[in-house]
Image (spheres, rainbow, N blue to C red):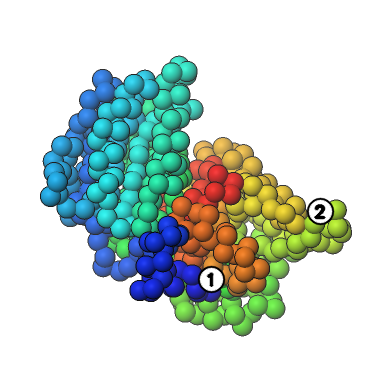
C-alpha cells in the first residue's frame, strides 16, 4: 500500500513542515534498475593497517577497488577529497587488520569527514575480521566494536543511505582469505539490490565462491528454484526476482490460491504446483515435479506462512497448532526430502523466511514468533550438517514490509512501525526478494547459517 505520510513529506508544504519541525523525512530508496550503475561515483575506498595507518591499497580494500574498476565506478583515495570535492556514492573501509582499540582512530579520522559528503542513497560498508575467529580479548573487542560503529552510523545517516558490515576470515595469513567472496558481498551492499538492508553484519567463511554464470545480469541462469507461498505478496516478488536473475521458478501454494499462483508463474514462464505444504508428501511431490519437468532442484525458498493472532493466554490448540504446522513443521518435514540423495546437490541453496517477530517477539503473536525464532535456530544448526555437501542454509528476517497484511494493521501501529527504522519507512516485497536472490547465487557460497534482517534497521529487535 502507499505511504501517505511519505508522499506528503515530499510535497512543497510537507517538505517545509518536515524541515521546520524536524519530522521524519523518508526519501525514495535507490532500488535496482536495469542499466543503472552499481552506485554513484566516486567511492572512497581505504584500509587501516595493523600499525594504525590509513592506506589506499592492499588487503580487502584492494579487492574492492578492483571490483569497482571493473564496474567503471570512480574511486577516491584517502586524503584526495577537498572542500570542492563531489558528493561520495559510498565509503568502504577495510578494518580487518585492526587488533587494538586505539587503531580505530585512523578509521574515524578518514571516515567522519567523508560521511559528511555522502550523496543521497549512499552506502557505508565496513570490512572486519570475524571476532569468532580471534582469541585474544583485546582483538575480539576491537573487531566487535565495528558492529556497534556500523549500527550507530546507520542510525545517523539520512536520505536513504545505509551502513552495513562484512566480517571476513582472518587476514593474518600471507594472502587475505576469500577476497572474491568479500568483494562479491560488498558489491551487493553497494548496489540498489540492498536498498532496505541496513545495520546488518554479513559473515563470510573460508569457502571459495562458486562461479556465477558469465552474464552478470543472470547470476541464477540454469538454476531451478522452488518458492512456497508464491501466489501473492512477498512470495510473488521472490518468484519474479529469481526469474529476473535467470532461474526457472516453480511456484507452490495451496489449491485455493491456484488462480493467483498461475498468474504469478505465467508472467515469468515458470510452473505452478498446488500443494498444501503441511501434507506429509508435500516435499516429495515438489521434488518429483522438479525432477520430471527440469531434471534438477537447486534452490528452495521456504516462504509459506500464516498468522493466527491472539494473546497467548487466549490462544487455543487450533490457533497454536496450525501456525506451528505451516510455519515450522512443514519446513522440517520437506527438508528431509530436499536433503535426501535425490534432492539438492552440490551448490544447493535453502533460504527460509524468519521475521523481526522471531527476534523481538510480538504481542499477540506467541505462536508466530515461536516459529520465526525456531527458524533462526534451524538454519544455524542445519548449515553445519550440510556444509560438506556444498549446500548453504540461511534465513532472512523482514521488518515492516508493505503488503496486504500490513494494510490491515491499525493506522497508528503501522505509522509507528514505519518511522522507527533508520530509513523511516516500510520496505517493499522486492526488498526481501533481492536479499534472497543474493543468498541463492553460486558466488554467495561463503555465507551460510545466518539470519539477515531486511528491515531498514528497525529499532524493534535491534
Query: Tag 1: Cα neighbours inside 10 Å, few (<14), some, or many (≥20)?
Result: many
Q: Earlier in the sequence, mark 2 or mark 1?
A: 1
Tell me residue 434's x, y (percent): 44, 60
Out of 84 and 17, give the one closest to the viewer: 17
Label 2 to label 1: alpha-carbon separation:
31 Å
Task: Report whether 271 appears left or right of 62.
Answer: right
Residue pointed to by mark 1: 236
- Kindly identify the residue that appears in the image at 26 percent across and 65 percent down: 36
Question: Left or right: 400 with respect to 370?
Answer: left
| Mark sitting on residue 312 | 2
Quadrant of the image for the C terminus? top right
Q: Quadrant of residue 21?
A: bottom left
Where does the image place residue 341, in percent across and percent down from the top left?
A: 59, 50
**Image: 393 above or below 136:** below
Q: Residues within 10 Å of mark 2 (few under 14, many from 20)?
A: few
Give the vertical position of 13 relative to 386 (above or below). Answer: below
Q: Residue at 71%, 63% (x, y): give it.
A: 307
Q: Is residue 351 visible?
A: no
Is residue 9 visible to us here? yes
Amino acid at each position: 500500500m502507499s505511504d501517505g505520510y511519505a508522499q506528503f513529506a515530499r510535497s512543497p508544504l510537507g517538505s517545509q513542515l518536515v524541515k521546520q519541525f524536524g519530522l521524519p523525512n523518508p526519501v525514495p530508496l535507490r532500488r535496482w534498475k536495469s542499466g543503472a550503475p552499481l552506485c554513484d561515483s566516486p567511492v572512497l575506498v581505504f584500509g587501516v593497517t595493523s600499525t594504525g595507518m590509513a592506506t589506499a591499497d592492499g588487503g580487502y580494500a584492494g579487492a574492492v577497488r578492483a571490483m569497482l574498476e571493473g564496474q567503471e565506478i570512480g574511486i577516491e583515495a584517502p586524503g584526495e577529497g577537498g572542500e570542492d570535492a563531489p558528493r561520495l556514492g559510498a565509503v568502504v573501509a577495510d578494518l580487518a587488520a585492526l587488533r587494538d582499540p586505539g587503531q580505530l582512530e585512523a578509521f574515524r579520522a578518514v571516515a567522519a569527514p567523508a560521511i559528511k559528503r555522502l550523496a543521497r542513497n549512499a552506502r557505508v560498508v565496513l570490512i572486519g575480521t570475524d571476532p569468532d575467529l580471534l582469541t585474544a580479548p583485546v582483538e575480539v573487542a576491537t573487531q566487535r566494536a565495528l558492529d556497534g560503529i556500523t549500527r550507530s552510523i546507520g542510525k545517523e545517516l539520512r536520505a536513504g543511505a545505509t551502513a552495513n558490515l562484512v566480517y571476513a576470515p582472518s587476514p593474518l595469513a600471507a594472502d587475505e582469505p576469500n577476497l572474491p567472496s568479500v568483494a562479491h558481498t560488498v558489491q551487493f551492499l553497494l548496489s540498489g539490490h540492498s536498498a532496505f538492508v541496513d545495520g546488518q553484519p554479513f559473515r563470510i567463511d573460508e569457502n571459495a565462491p562458486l562461479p556465477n554464470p558469465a552474464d552478470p545480469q543472470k547470476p541464477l541462469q540454469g538454476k531451478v528454484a522452488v518458492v512456497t507461498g508464491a501466489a501473492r505478496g512477498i512470495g510473488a516478488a521472490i518468484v519474479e526476482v529469481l526469474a529476473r536473475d535467470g532461474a526457472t521458478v516453480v511456484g507452490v501454494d495451496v489449491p485455493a490460491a491456484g488462480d493467483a499462483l498461475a498468474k504469478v508463474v505465467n508472467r515469468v514462464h515458470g510452473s505452478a504446483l498446488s500443494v498444501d505444504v503441511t501434507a506429509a508428501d508435500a516435499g516429495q511431490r515438489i521434488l518429483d515435479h522438479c525432477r520430471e519437468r527440469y531434471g534438477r532442484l537447486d534452490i528452495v525458498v521456504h516462504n509459506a506462512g500464516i498468522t493466527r493472532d491472539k494473546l497467548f493466554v487466549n490462544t487455543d490448540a487450533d490457533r497454536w497448532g496450525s501456525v506451528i504446522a505451516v510455519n515450522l513443521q512443514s519446513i522440517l518435514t520437506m527438508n528431509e526430502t530436499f536433503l535426501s540423495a535425490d534432492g539438492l546437490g552440490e551448490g544447493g541453496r535453502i533460504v527460509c523466511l524468519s521475521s523481526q517477530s522471531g527476534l523481538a517477539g510480538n504481542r499477540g503473536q506467541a505462536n508466530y514468533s515461536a516459529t520465526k525464532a525456531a527458524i533462526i535456530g534451524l538454519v544455524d544448526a542445519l548449515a553445519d550438517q550440510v556444509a560438506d555437501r556444498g549446500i548453504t542454509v540461511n534465513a532472512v528476517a523482514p521488518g515492516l514490509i508493505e503488503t496486504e497484511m500490513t494494510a490491515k494493521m491499525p493506522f497508528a501501529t503501522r505509522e509507528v512501525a514505519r518511522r522507527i527504522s533508520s530509513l523511516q519507512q516500510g520496505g517493499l516485497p522486492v526488498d526481501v526478494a533481492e536479499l534472497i536472490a543474493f543468498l541463492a547465487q553460486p558466488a554467495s557460497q561463503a555465507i551460510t547459517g545466518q539470519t539477515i534482517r531486511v528491515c531498514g534497521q528497525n529499532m524493534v529487535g535491534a
